[in-house]
Image (cartoon, rainbow, N blue to C red):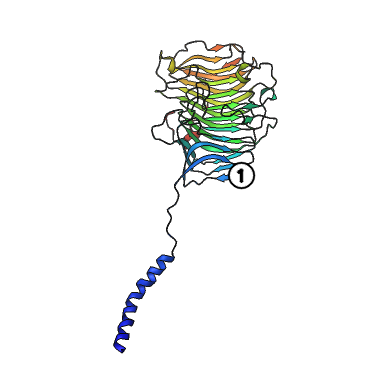
Amino acid sequence: MKKLFLRFMVSMAILTPFVLASCSDDNDEPTVPPVTESELSGSIKTSKTLDANITYTITGPVIVEDGATLTIPAGTVIKAEKGFSNYILVLQGGKIYVNGTADKPVVMTADISNAEAGHWGGLVINGRAPLAGNTTGSTEINAAYIYGGNIPADNSGSITYLKLEFTGAKSSADVEHNGLTLNGVGNGTIIENIYVIEGADDAIEFFGGTVNVKNLLAVNPDDDMFDFTQGYTGTLENAYGIWEAAYISSESDPRGIEADGNWDGLTPDQQGQSNFRVVNMTIDLKLPYNTTDVKKQMQDAIKIRRGAKATITNALIKGTGAALDLVDFTDGKGAGDATSSINLTNQLTNPLLGKTTNGTGTVTFSDNNTGCASNIFAWTGYTNF
């Protein structure tokens, strides 16, 4: 009996570590791998902060509602599926905080490696700052999404160090997104250090509002580099636009600057026509010398029309590409404000296809304008200056 008991005790001593280990494993929580990818779509009604460790994919409209906030930390990558309905829209009263840094910019791009311009919608912000005629506008996305008002200092958040790639999806020939669309955005909003590359339609378009934008690089926009309309009254400072050597436009009238005082020239008698400033601008046309291909020719380097007043200082137009006109104040729906003033240096090596200046406005030619410095865009990684 004693031998049997000793044998039993020895057996238990041998088995006990395995039994305890087994019991311990059963009680531990299972290891869950970290989330590295997530879909992004739908309405944001309160507040939402993204995680820079997660790659997000836009699979439908992302709407930041009135009173809600979308915060995007430095280094976040947001990809978008192909289509007109894939975009980010901040409604009136909503706020977006894109908190990129020079070392860790926020990237909004396509969900495939071989994307082209027009892959997805882009970023749209609707504010409550004034439009020409103190009117209210509505987006082409949805007429219920209005913009404009009577709050010049309206605040829609802040955007710093943001890359926008392959934007400008369209639903028809006349309804298309830009890279960054600012609808009645107020000057309480901070927008600095923006890079828009390979986008359809315009790199940036201001529909009224008072917001100031600083440090903007636009590379190969399909239409205009910098577009102003509907009573915009802010300042664009440090703007650099480039057409690379292989660039081809699908638009009939691509321009460096296109400025309208009012919407489509339909309301020339409205109070509050566009009256804006551009400080330090370079337009660089790297296209082949003496090309006869109209898809590789800029319609106008600077077009001021339909009641718009522009004050442009330290502008530089350079490169080997062709432009129909350097500065044009004329238009079938109304000329630009005759008190507009433009100071520029023309370093285009290709003779202009049309005239240096059309219409009435003050154009002062300087020999040594520096335009926009390129080193402020080192954070983008773009080097073809």
Q: Residues within 10 Å of mark 1 (few under 14, many from 20)?
A: few
Quarter occupied by the N terminus:
bottom left
Picture layout, residue 360 above or below residue 93? above
Residue under label 1, please give it.
Answer: 46
Quarter occupied by the C terminus:
top left
- Residue 42 in percent (x, y) is at 54, 39
- Residue 92 in percent (x, y) is at 64, 35
Q: Residue at x 61, y 35 (%)?
A: 91
Query: Would you say 184 lies left or right of 60 here?
Result: right
Q: Depth check: 318 or 11 in front?
A: 11
Q: Residue at x 42, y 32 (%)?
A: 383
Q: Please identify the residue farthest to the front as the structure is shown.
A: 1
Query: Would you say 269 lies left or right of 240 here?
Result: right
The answer to whether any part of residue 355 appears in the image is: yes
Q: Residue at x 66, y 21 (%)?
A: 273
Number of disc labels: 1
The answer to whether any part of residue 103 appears in the image is: no
Picture layout, residue 67 above or below residue 313? below
Kind of residue indicated by mark 1? Thr
Q: Please identify the residue farthest to the bottom as the structure is shown.
A: 2
Q: Depth check: 297 or 376 in front?
A: 297
- Residue 236 in percent (x, y) is at 58, 28
Query: Element type at marker 1?
Result: loop
- Residue 296 in percent (x, y) is at 43, 18
Quadrant of the rendered image containing residue 134:
top right
Q: Depth check: 202 or 12 in front?
A: 12
Q: Depth check: 113 or 304 in front?
A: 113
Q: Residue at x 69, y 19 (%)?
A: 270
